[in-house]
Image: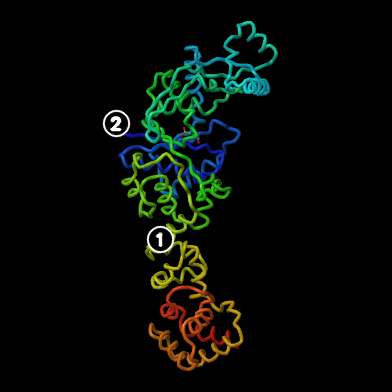
Amino acid sequence: MTVKVRFAPSPTGKLHVGNIRTALVNWLFAKGQGGTFVLRIDDTDLERSTKENEEGIRRDLTWLGMTWDETFKQSEKFERYRQAAEELKAKGLLYPCYETADELERRKKIALSRGKPPVYDRAALELTDEQRKALEAEGRKPHWRFKLSGGRAEWNDLVRGQQSIDTSSVSDPVLIREDGSFLYTMPSVVDDVDAKITHVIRGEDHVTNSGAQIEIFLALGGQPPEMAHMPLLIGADGQGLSKRLGSLSAEQLRNEGYEPLALLSLLSKIGTSDPVEARESLQQLALEFSFSKMGRAPARFDENELNGLNAQIVHAMSFEMVKPRLEKLAYGDQATPDFWDVVRGNLQGVPDAAMWLAVVYGGGLKGPDLEADDRAFVGDAAKLFPAGEATLETWKAWVDAVKAKTGRKGKGLFQPLRRVLTDQEHGPEMDRMLLLIGAEKARARLEQASA
Ligand code: GLU
């Protein structure tokens, strides 16, 4: 069997971390098995779907490296869905209902007040032809429900193990709205049958849908695919995702300068028995992926962990890799391999390089506000600054001379000098920094600070 999976986002919004994880697990599973990854755009809701969101989803997946082997949109297949609906009607499995939303709500409340589950009572199945005609003459338009068997829908879930849903405990799902538009439930099954999808991999919020969808697969003469329902993401505090994380989009992460592989490494490892570590490629992640490693507890998405992985990836990045991105920052066109080598260990993300570019290649800095004694100290240090061009030895020789002259040592000795030369409290090794900054700029900064 050749594995074929689909990732099926609705273009009603942006791709956020939850969807990215679903896409990723589909992608890793497919590629690990030498299979096919299909991108299906679930745009049956024509009002809420936008071209802009669809393009955004494609752009985000491409940025993340999750390219697709095939793609299609549900809005191109309405004729096919109508045909499938006729097939279900002919089998007596799709029936018209005329209740308004208010009526359904009222019945639900009554059921609940009697201690009964709020399941649709199938009153519409009892309507005679005359009653239907009368309702339609009143101007009511039917919505259409799928008739569940009332038995159990069962499957062996790749994450959750043996599943059994009592279909008598859920309402017959509405497949077609009053206006004739399709809800997601049936088109998804039709597409999975047509595309010969072998594995449906999605979040566990779809478990109940799966009960109904398995019956629709069988009703349409298809074989239900294997299914995997992943536990949802939670925040680091064990609560649901925070507002920021819940709506954190791929676009925002890209704009904030995150590395795709930091995000992908994190999302592929959380909730599994593997340690959370950065990996260099999606292929590597695919080799390590297995549903047998995925637990049933929710997966914790911790932004600190993401930042840590991001820093790890940035620290290991070569100058060649980062050059085009540095070039987009001010002074970035002047950056040398040495610059990158010196600063990368201090960056959490590539955009942080902007500050060091300005320190090294920019002109005057704002300069620290020094206390009077530090200003005098920097004045002494300025006079001792070696003549000529800076070398790798300049920093040590200079600091030794300043120490001998002023008697200062440790932090009191280094810190004001670092602050004057770089405007920062912390940073890369100063001998290498000074070499990058150059003697001329260093002198000017010392003079400005002690003036
Ligand atoms: N469009 C559906 C969603 O985003 C797809 C669910 C599925 O994978 O079947 O929830």
Q: Is residue 312 above or below residue 165?
A: below
Tell me the residue at 40%/24% (across/down). 154
Q: Is residue 20 left or right of residue 106?
A: left
Residue 363, percent from left and from top: 54, 78
Q: Is residue 220 above or below residue 444?
A: above
Query: Within 10 Å of the Cα at label 1, are there few (<14), some (14-19), or many (20+) other Cα atoms?
Result: many
State the count of labels: 2
Residue 288, percent from left and from top: 32, 46
Closer to the camera in the image, 224 or 36: 224
Q: CA distance from mark 2 to mark 1?
A: 38 Å
Residue 383, percent from left and from top: 51, 93
What is the quadrant of the C terminus in the image? bottom right
Circle number at residue 1: 2
Tell me the residue at 48%/56% (across/down). 304
Q: Please, which residue is most extreme toward the front here?
A: 115
Q: Earlier in the sequence, mark 2 or mark 1?
A: 2
Closer to the camera in the image, 42 or 373: 373
The residue identified by callout 1 is 312
Task: Please name which of the two marks, 2 or 1, marks the residue nearer to the observer.
Answer: 1
What is the quadrant of the N terminus in the image? top left
Tell me the residue at 52%/30% (across/down). 75
- The answer to whether the residue bearing label 1 lies less than 8 angstroms from the nearest atom of ligand 1 is no
Q: Please, which residue is most extreme toward the right here?
A: 138
Closer to the camera in the image, 65 or 408: 408
Q: Amino acid at mark 2?
A: Met
Q: Secondary structure at mark 2?
A: loop
Q: Secondary structure at mark 1?
A: helix
Q: Amino acid at mark 1?
A: Gln
Tell me the residue at 58%/16% (across/down). 121
